[in-house]
Image (cartoon, coloured by chain):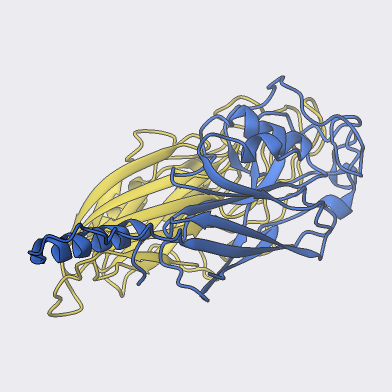
Amino acid sequence: MFMSAKKLSTLLILASLGLSACSDDDEPMTMMPPDPDPVMISYDVTVTNLTHAHPLSPLAVILHQNDGFWAIGEMASPELEMLAESGDNSQLIAMADAMVSASGTGLIMPGNSETVSITIEDVDDANLTIASMLANTNDGFTGLNGLALGELAIGGSWSGVGFVYDAGTEANTEAMGSIVGPADGGEGFSEIRDDVNYVAMHPGIVSMDDGLSTSVLTQAHRFDNPAMKVVITRTE
Amino acid sequence: MKTIATLGAVALAVSSLSHAAELDITVQNLTQGIYFTPLLISAHPSDASFYKLGEMASGELQAMAEGGDISGLMSIADGMSANSSANPAEGMLAPSTTVMTSLSTDSANTHLSLMAMLLPTNDGFVGLDSWEIPSEAGTYHFYLNGYDAGTEANDEMITGGGAPGAAGIPKDPAGKQGMNATGVTDMETNMMIHVHRGNLGDDMMDGGKSDLNNTVHRWLNPVAKVTVTVN
C-alpha cells in the first residue's frame, strides 16, 4: 500500500506545525515545510494484436478518473466515433476527461505487439482506458474501458484481453469505399450516423465468402473475441 | 467463465457454507441486435439445475429456448424451492439494455442460474448454470455465452413457430427480418445443449436461405454481462 502524495504532504505539514508549536525560543522560524517532490507513477502498456488480418490503429492510452469513454447501450461520443471509423485517436486522447494520454506510434499488425509508456504525477489510483480500431471494419474497435489501477503496486502487473465493440455509428455494410483499412482503402470518418447509434459488442464481420455479396472483406477478415492481449506493468 | 471479484472491505462472518443472502443482480444484453425474451433468474440448491451443457434439454428448457416461455421453468424452480426473479425486464430485454433485480435467498439456495431465449434464433438461449453465490460480500462480474438447446433445426425461417417442436423462429422484435427463405438446414445434428454456432443470415430480404440479415442478426460471445452484488 502506497501513501498518496496528498496524504504525504499533509503529514509533512502537520509534522512541521508540531515542531513549531514545541519551539518556545525567539528565533525566527526558518524551517519551512519542504515542497514535496511530485511522485511519478508510470505504466508500461503492452498490446498484442490477436486477430488474423486486422491492423490495430495507433493505440489510444488514457489515464483518467471518470468511469470510462464508452458504455454498452449508450451513444458513442464523436471522438470515439472518429477512432472507430477512421483509426484517428487524436480527438479521443484530447478529451477533457483525459488526465494524461499517450498514443501508439503506428499500426499494430496481426501477431505484433507494441508497448506504450504513460506517466502521471501524484495519482496512484487512476483508471486506464485503451482503444484501437480494427482497421478492416466499418466501426469496430477493441479496448479496455476504465480499468482501475489503484491496487497495482510498483513492479506489479495486470494482464487480460480486449473484446471487440461496435461504435454503432456506421452500418456494417462492408461495402467498397466504406472501410478505411487496407482491405478497402475507403472512407474513414463520416459524421453521418446510419446505424443503431449505441455502442454494443461487435457482431463480427460477414465477408464475401460467407454470404455478403457486396462485401470487400474475405474470410481472412473474420474475427472472434478477444482481439487483443494486454499486459500492464507499473514501473514506478 | 472468468470471474473478477471486487471484494468489500468487510468480510461477513460466515458460520457455515449455507447462508441466506440479499443479492442485487444486473443483467446486460451486450449484443447489437439480439433480444432476450423474459429472463428467469433463480437461486437454488447445489444439487439442482435447469440444464447442463452436453446433456439433453428438458421440455421446459425447450419451451423457453424455442418460444421464450418460462412458465415450465418456473414450475421447476418452485419444485426446487428456489428463490426466483421471473421476467424482471417485464418483457424483452432489448439489445444493449440492462435490467436490475433483487433476490433474497434462503440458506439452502446457494447457486444461481439464469436463462432467456435469444431472439431471433430457432432455439438459442443465454444461460448461466449453477454459479456458486459467494459467501463474501462484494460485487462480482461475469460474462455469459449463447447456447443452443439442440432441440430444433436452425433453419432461420421466421414462421411464427415458437411452440416446442414447431419449426421456425417466432419473430424479430426489431422487424429487420427478410422473408420467403428456403431454410439454412433441416437438421440438428447435436441434440445436446451446446455453444451456439451463431446465426448465419443472408443478404437477401426476399428469398435466400435465411430470413435473418447477416449484418444485423449475428453475434459473437459473450452475449451478456452479469453483475451480482452480495450485500
Q: The C terminus of chain B appears in which quarter of the rendering?
A: bottom left
Query: In the shown orientation, is residue B14 left or right of residue A87?
Result: left
Residue at x 48%, y 53% (from the top left corner): A127
Work out whether residue A227 or residue A191 is closer to the camera in this orientation and state it.
A191
Q: Which chain is blue?
A: A
Query: In the shown orientation, is residue B75 left or right of residue A63?
Result: left
Residue extending farthest bottom: B16
Vertical side of B178 occupied by A72: above or below: below
Q: Which chain is yellow?
A: B
Image quadrant of residue A194? top right
Work out whether residue B78 or residue B85 is closer to the camera in this orientation and state it.
B85
Residue B201 place in picture, x, y as percent:
74, 40
Work out whether residue A2 or residue B190 is closer to the camera in this orientation and state it.
A2
Residue extending farthest front: A26
Residue A100 place in picture, x, y as percent:
56, 47
Residue A214 place in picture, x, y as percent:
90, 33
Image quadrant of residue A182? top right
Vertical side of B207 occupied by A136: above or below: below
* Res B62 seen here: no
Vertical side of A38 occupied by A141: above or below: above
* Res B92 seen here: yes
Query: In the shown orientation, is residue A134 left or right of residue A120?
Result: right
Vertical side of B25 occupied by A15: above or below: below
Work out whether residue A41 or residue B106 is closer to the camera in this orientation and state it.
A41
Residue extending farthest top: A192
Residue B31 place in picture, x, y as percent:
57, 42
